[in-house]
Amino acid sequence: EIVLTQSPGTLSLSPGERATLSCRASQSVTSNNLAWYQQKPGQAPRLLINGAFTRARGIPDRFSGRGSGTDFTLTISRLESEDFAVYYCQQYGDSPLTFGQGTKVEFK
Amino acid sequence: VQMVESGGALVEPGGSLRLSCAASGFTFVDAWMSWVRQSPGKGLEWVGRMKSKRSGGTIEYAAPVKGRFTISRDDSKNTLYLQMNSLKTEDTAIYYCTWHETVNLYFDHWGQGGLVTVSA
């Protein structure tokens, strides 16, 4: 099983700042099959990124993904108020499908 | 696209429960579907996946639920099911029905979730 470790656990930032979230895999993610999700309290997660860097439909371009192999990053270029949430990475290159434990982006 | 889970409830350890997921807005008969759960205040955990019958209808389960949970579907009703037997307290979670829009197994679309509480 591929274990995904996200860091930091919590990121305290202000609107307009840049957020950089990390996701590290215990082994190489097949074909860079890595996705990112955003979850707000009381809501289901929402797909942001698939294939490590492809934005899902309707996702603003301030969200970007990069990385390969075992190291992946989600960047939010300029935080807006609606971006404060928990973010999860997920690998879908191997079974079982696994998620990271999440990074919370909170108001500073 | 909409998926609506139902059937969540409070059940005693060792008990059984069946969740339903009514889907609309897409061609369910061709859909690959998964269940994902989230324990209170915790992260996300994939439960299992069922391919469309056209793709073989293959079902795969996560290790913690294998042998206790069963995924099935009724394409005539556009409905996915999760039969949960021998429930444990650690199965307490919100269970989300999800649709994989392509054969890539990321979760494009999510239902609102159904709460299952296992407690004496």
Image (cartoon, rainbow, N blue to C red):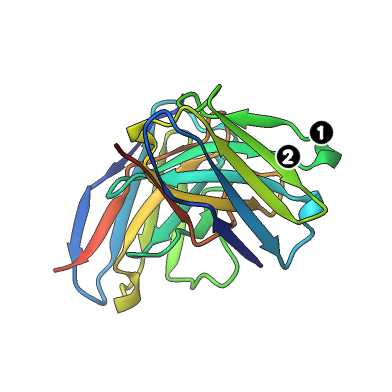
Kind of residue indicated by mark 2: Lys
Residue B93 image offset from top left, x and y in percent: 38, 45
Residue most extreme to the left: A108
Q: Is B99 situated left or right of A43 in this image?
A: right
- Which residue is label 2 attached to? B51
Whether tag 2 and tag 1 are in contact, CB under 8 A, the answer is yes
Comparing B74 with A45, the one in front is B74
Say left or right for A3 vs B17.
left
Please, which chain is the residue tagged with disc 2 on? Answer: B
| Residue B110 visible in the shown view | no
Q: Which residue is found at the position 43% from the left and 33% from the top?
A: A70
Tag 1 subunit: B
Q: Nearer the viewer, residue A108 or B83?
A: B83
Q: Which of A7 and A66 is in front in this view?
A: A7
Q: How crowded is mark 2: few (under 14 residues within 10 Å), some or many (20 or more)?
A: many
Q: Residue reaching furthest right? A: B54
The residue tagged 1 is B56
Q: Where is residue B3 in the image (x, y as percent from the top left)?
A: 61, 61
The location of residue A84, given as percent across then percent down, is 29, 68
